[in-house]
Image (cartoon, rainbow, N blue to C red):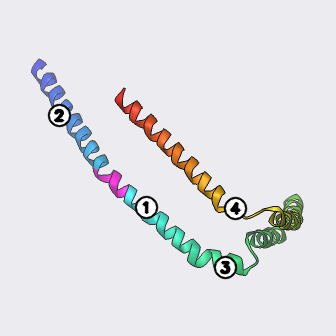
Amino acid sequence: MADESSTSGAEGSKKSFSQGLAGAVAKKALVPVAATAATYLTRKVSELWQEKILPAVEERGGGRAVLKAALEKAAGRTRGSTSAMLSDLAGRLDEGSSERESSSERSEITEEPQTSDAREAERKERAQRRQQRQRALEQSGKS
């Protein structure tokens, strides 16, 4: 009877080892597949957005107009305080769009186009920051 428990313990450890090994191999195999699938889906969703959804939204007057129409439709299908709340929110979208348009018109008038000297200065600053980050990375790798 003592022999049976020792052999079953050895078999159990072999099974757990093989299960652990199989799990590790599965992870190693599935991680690249999952990353590739995520990249593919991201690219496809971006293409779908650019080709189908964005033109349809712009055709209907922009995101605010589409949202307002959806809120009004939902308000028509609901009752009571929910309907009132959705209608109020749709009304706020109208108010916000007129305020936003007037402020964007003002900002367009006051903003000056960026000169090539200013752009060049920004490029140099970005290059310096990149070099500093690179040096910091190299130093952290050495220690």
Are the residues tagged 3 and 4 within 8 Å (C-beta)?
Answer: no
Are the residues tagged 2 and 1 within 8 Å (C-beta)?
Answer: no
Task: Choose top left, top right, bottom left or bottom right for residue 70.
Answer: bottom right
Query: Going from the N terminus, do you reach mark 3 or mark 1 first?
Result: 1
Name the quarter where the N terminus is drawn.
Answer: top left
* Extreme residue toward the front, this view: 117
Dot 2 crowding, Cα within 10 Å, few <14, some 14–19, many 20+: few
Residue 40 relative to residue 5: left or right: right
Residue 104 lies, in percent from the top left, at 82, 65
Read off the residue under disc 3.
Answer: 56
The amino acid type found where label 2 is placed reads Lys
Read off the residue under disc 4.
Answer: 114
* Secondary structure state at the residue bearing disc 2: helix
* Secondary structure state at the residue bearing disc 3: helix
**Which of label 1 and label 4 is nearer to you?**
4
Please say if 8 is above or below 104: above
Residue 115 lies, in percent from the top left, at 68, 62
The amino acid type found where label 4 is placed reads Gln
Residue numbers of the magenta segment: 29-34
128 vs 77, nearest the viewer: 128
Query: Going from the N terminus, do you reach mark 3 or mark 4 first?
Result: 3
